[in-house]
Each structure stands twice: as structure tokens, then as C-alpha cells.
Image (cartoon, rainbow, N blue to C red):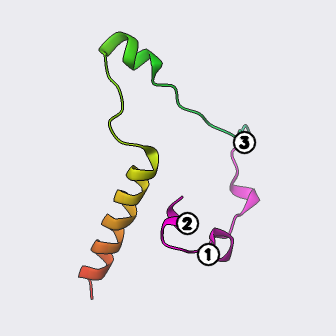
Amino acid sequence: MAFEYVGLEMARHVVIDPSLFRPAEVDVLLGDASKAKRKLGWEPTIALEEIVAEMVDADLKRLASRH
């Protein structure tokens, strides 16, 4: 999502080293906030895509301030 947000292809910028994989690596990880909702009444107020955009924007702003 972060690469897509800034218009880059992840495969052109990321090198994956299979020797660093965890032995029990899973292909898909999914979160489930139903317990937090049930026990605490908590619900998310921002979508994952918005969180990614905020994080990327913050990183870009920090990098720009170094120059």
C-alpha cells in the first residue's frame, strides 16, 4: 500500500532475502478487533489505507526536512 501510495513498484525497490524468513512464516496475517469491540466498546475510526498514507506522509516530511 505504501509503495502504491507514492506511485512506486515495490518489486523494483525491495530485495527479499529468503534466509531471513522465520521458520514458521505464514502467508497471510489478519487482525480481528471483535474482542476489543465486545469487551471495550472500541471500534477503529480510521481505515488501514489512511494509516498507511499518514505514515508515508510523515516519513516524506521528515526526509524533506533533512535537506
Label at residue 45 = none
Q: Is the residue 16 above or below the residue 22 in the image?
A: below
Q: At 53% across and 31% down in the image, what residue appears?
A: 31
Q: Is the residue 46 above or below the residue 32 in the image?
A: below
Q: CA distance from mark 1 to mark 2?
A: 12 Å
Residue at the farthest bottom position: 67
Instruction: Name the spot of residue 48 as percent of width and height, x first.
Output: 45, 45
Q: What quarter of the picture does the C terminus occupy? A: bottom left
Residue 10 within the segment the image draws in magenta: yes
On the picture, is 55 further left or further right than 7?
left
Residue nearest the observer in this picture, 12 or 45: 45
Q: CA distance from mark 1 to mark 3?
A: 21 Å
Amino acid at circle 3: Asp
Residue on which disc 2 sits: 4
Q: CA distance from mark 2 to mark 3?
A: 20 Å
Residue at the farthest left position: 65
Earlier residue among tags 1 and 2? 2
Instruction: Name the spot of residue 66 as percent of width and height, x first.
Output: 26, 83
Dot 1 alpha-carbon crowd within 10 angstroms: few under 14, some 14 to 19, many 20 or more: few
Q: Quadrant of residue 42?
A: top left
Instruction: Name the spot of residue 38 as percent of width and height, x first.
Output: 39, 11
SS class, disc 3: loop
On the picture, is 8 further left or further right than 37?
right
Residue 50 within the segment the image draws in magenta: no
Residue on which disc 3 sits: 27
On the picture, is 67 further left or further right than 24?
left
Q: Quadrant of residue 58?
A: bottom left
SS class, disc 1: loop
Residue on which disc 1 sits: 13
